[in-house]
Amino acid sequence: MEETRSDSSFGSKPTVDELLDELVELRLPAMAEQIPLVRMLTHGVVSRADFGLDAIADAKMAVDEACAQLVQLAELGAQLQCRFRLAPDGLHVIVSTRSTDPRPPSDRTFGWHVLTTLSKSVTAHCDVLPGGGAGIVTIELVLNPGTSA
């Protein structure tokens, strides 16, 4: 005999504590054509985290720009990895890819200015892989939730 389970929280929004334990990760080819998928995921994650309308738009633009910068640096056939985790200080987003040029993106570009304007904090680094010549380039963002609208 099947047991019927009644869960009154089914379909309801998760609590902040539940979200703080949640990691959302997406891996996809490091190609510009894939960035809209990351943008859609960003929208879903920040909406569930109760970001305000302006903060949702800012988050989507910031993650889009971080992905675009890394796609330009990615080696042929590399994957783009995007991780989202809610924390008390905002949404932490880590975007990384493998690059044959083991240097972080320049902080003197218009794109970097966009990132710093739309994010609470932005850092970039590159971890050189053994044997040299290649590395994992990473951009880390902390995004502000703003207020619900």
Image (tube, rainbow, N blue to C red):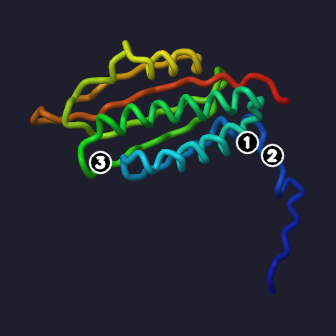
User: How far apart are labels 2 and 1 at the CA level?
Assistant: 7 Å
Q: Nearer the viewer, mark 1 or mark 3?
A: 3
Report the Cα–Cα distance between label 1 and label 3. Answer: 30 Å
Quarter of the image holding residue 86? top right
Q: Residue furthest top?
A: 108
Crowding around mark 1 (Cα neighbors within 10 Å: few <14, some 14 to 19, many 20+) is: some
Q: Earlier in the sequence, mark 1 or mark 3?
A: 1
At 67% across and 45% down in the image, what residue appears? Answer: 44
Q: Tell me which label, 2 or 3, sits earlier in the chain.
A: 2
> 60 and 24: which one is in front?
60
Q: Residues within 10 Å of mark 3 (few under 14, many from 20)?
A: some
Image position, residue 135 (x, y; %)? 23, 34
Kindly indicate whether the residue at mark 1 contacts the one at mark 2 (C-beta within 8 angstroms): yes
Residue position marked by numbered label 3 in the rendering: 78
Which amino acid type is shown beneath numbered disc 3?
Ala
Most extreme residue toward the left is 131
Secondary structure type for disc 2:
loop
Q: Is residue 114 left or right of residue 132?
A: right
Looking at the rendered structure, the kind of residue marked 1 is Arg
Q: Which residue is mark 1?
A: 48
Query: What's under tag 2, amino acid-wise?
Result: Lys
- Name the residue: 86% across, 60% down: 7
Residue under pointer 2:
13
